[in-house]
Image (tube, rainbow, N blue to C red):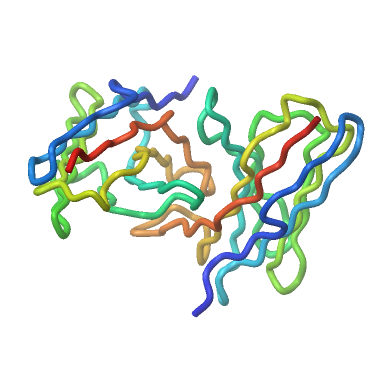
Amino acid sequence: GESVGLHLPTLSVQEGDNSIINCAYSNSASDYFIWYKQESGKGPQFIIDIRSNMDKRQGQRVTVLLNKTVKHLSLQIAATQPGDSAVYFCAEINSGGYQKVTFGTGTKLQVIP
Amino acid sequence: KAGVTQTPRYLIKTRGQQVTLSCSPISGHRSVSWYQQTPGQGLQFLFEYFSETQRNKGNFPGRFSGRQFSNSRSEMNVSTLELGDSALYLCASSSTGTGEGSEKLFFGSGTQLSVL
């Protein structure tokens, strides 16, 4: 069946360093991917997305890379700040179905001041 | 523009009881989806409603049901509660729910349900 998995459950990063959060997915039919950030006590918040016809997309301090050959997605956060501490989820969507989003289990990012 | 609003924020119930959770989507959004979040299973899709019709359903037992009203507000009901139903229940809205383009899901803060 479909599954989205994360390689590392917890990632500790020094403030100011770059962070890389990885995600593996198994459904080759997925054509849209999203990264969400969830802070304690809040719902997931959209960070950045990428369609399967792209291999890289940049936002403000964040970059998402997509490698369809190995079904791998990564989120890079530049100059990590204490406010980046949260759980990060990758999600995949097969736009052949209505809004059935499959989420990974999440990676907890801890920023060390 | 107000975000997705979920009520109540916290809920404590006992086994065998039933519970109803409420979700008000962002104004203009017609798609509402529900997710269960637990530490062990992560975020799992429950169901999605659009224009008062359930369009998609996850792999949850029939004890979990929902509905959507004409104003797009949605409710989720869990009957005969079990200990394993303890979780954060999240509601998300989007304009059409088709996943096309940059269709984004906007989440509420969730309802934390504890079953004793």
On screen, residue A29 versus residue A50, left or right, reads right
Within the image, what quadrant is residue B41 found in?
Answer: top right
Out of B68 and A60, give the one closest to the viewer: A60
Which percent across, then down, holds residue A87? 37, 39
Q: Residue furthest front?
A: A113
Out of A57 and B41, give the one closest to the viewer: B41
Query: Split into 4 quadrants, where in the image is the C terminus of chain A?
Result: top left
Q: State whether residue A13 is above or below residue A47.
A: above
Residue under the point 29% across and 21% down: A7
Which percent across, then down, holds residue A15? 13, 44
Residue under the point 9% across and 40% down: A18
Looking at the rendered structure, the number of numbered marks drawn on it comes to 0
Q: State whether residue B63 is above or below residue A78.
A: above
Residue under the point 79% across and 43% down: B65
Which percent across, then down, holds residue A41? 51, 49
Q: State whether residue B26 is above or below residue B23.
A: below
Which percent across, then down, holds residue A106? 39, 32
Within the image, what quadrant is residue B86 found in?
Answer: top right
Residue under the point 22% across and 40% down: A111
